[in-house]
Image (cartoon, helix red, strand yellow):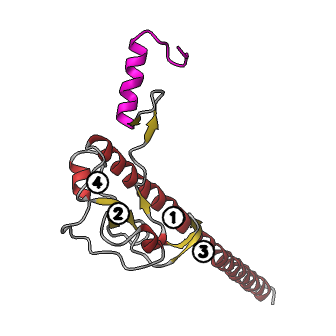
């Protein structure tokens, strides 16, 4: 009988260890179940931030193109990449595909794109160049961007890229002419930031 008593204690100790292991695993499963939606939300927020960054990169590239080519819009995204206004052709982080281009003079305004209206086809045929991009995803977003709650309503459009400035003589100058007039003022002996 003395030999059976330690065996029972060992078996009951193994049983308690198994129960403790199962309890720990169930607690971990519940914690992971609670953490998973939070993790998915964090990933989605990161994708939204990346969408805004990439869309603004397209806007900046279009503005730089306009500055170089007297206010004209680029005919397509490949021109922006080839002429190094854009590092690469960015993908829409929400869908994993290309952005939907928004064309000038296509009959679709940015308001139509924001309202979720159908955008024109992406081929270039007899209309103005690209003025911006939008996402192809129709999903609801977690946050609002410019008061819009769906990804395809988040339009990234280059508006007012060529700024006009009225000079002291009353002549309206574009951004490039304004830079030239500042340089000529400083070369005439006027210090920058000082009124003559």
Q: Report the front residue among 29 and 149.
A: 149
Q: Position of residue 191 (x, y in %)?
A: 49, 13
Q: Residues within 10 Å of mark 2 (few under 14, many from 20)?
A: some
**Element class at badge 1:** helix
Residue 42 visible (yes or no): no
Q: Position of residue 145 (x, y in %)?
A: 55, 64
Mark linked to residue 36: 3
Mark linked to residue 91: 2
Q: Which residue is mark 4?
A: 73
For this view, does 116 lie left or right of residue 96? Answer: right
Instruction: Based on the picture, tell me whether residue 114 belongs to the magenta stretch.
Output: no
Q: Report the front residue among 52 and 103.
A: 103
Q: Earlier in the sequence, mark 3 or mark 2?
A: 3
> CA separation, marks 2 and 1?
13 Å
For this view, does 117 lie left or right of residue 194? Answer: left
Q: Which residue is mark 1?
A: 48
**Element class at badge 4:** loop
Mark 1 or mark 4, whichever is nearer to me: 4
Which image quadrant is residue 32 in? Answer: bottom right
Q: Report the front residue among 82 and 45.
A: 82
Mark linked to residue 124: none
The magenta region covers 174-196
> CA separation, marks 3 and 2?
26 Å
Whether label 3 touches label 1, CB < 8 Å: no
> CA separation, marks 3 and 1?
18 Å
Mark 3 or mark 1, whichever is nearer to me: 1
For this view, does 73 lie left or right of residue 26? Answer: left
**Element class at badge 2:** loop
- Give the number of callouts: 4
Query: Residue at left 27%, top 75%?
Result: 121
Query: Residue at left 30%, top 66%?
Result: 105
């Amino acid at each position: 009988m003395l030999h059976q008593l330690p065996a029972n204690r060992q078996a009951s100790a193994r049983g308690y260890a198994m129960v403790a292991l199962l309890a720990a695993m169930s607690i971990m499963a519940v914690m992971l179940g609670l953490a998973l939606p939070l993790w998915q939300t964090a990933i989605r927020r990161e994708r939204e931030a990346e969408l805004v960054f990439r869309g603004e990169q397209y806007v900046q590239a279009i503005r730089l193109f306009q500055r170089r080519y007297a206010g004209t819009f680029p005919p397509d995204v490949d021109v922006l990449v080839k002429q190094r206004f854009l590092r690469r052709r960015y993908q829409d982080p929400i869908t994993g595909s290309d952005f939907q281009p928004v064309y000038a003079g296509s009959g679709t305004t940015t308001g139509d794109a924001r309202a979720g209206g159908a955008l024109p086809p992406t081929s270039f045929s007899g209309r103005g160049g690209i003025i911006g991009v939008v996402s192809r995803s129709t999903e609801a977003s977690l946050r609002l961007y410019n008061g819009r709650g769906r990804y395809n309503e988040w339009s990234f459009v280059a508006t007012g890229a060529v700024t006009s400035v009225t000079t002291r003589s009353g002549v309206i100058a574009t951004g490039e002419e304004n830079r030239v007039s500042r340089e000529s003022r400083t070369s005439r002996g006027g210090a920058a930031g000082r009124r003559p």
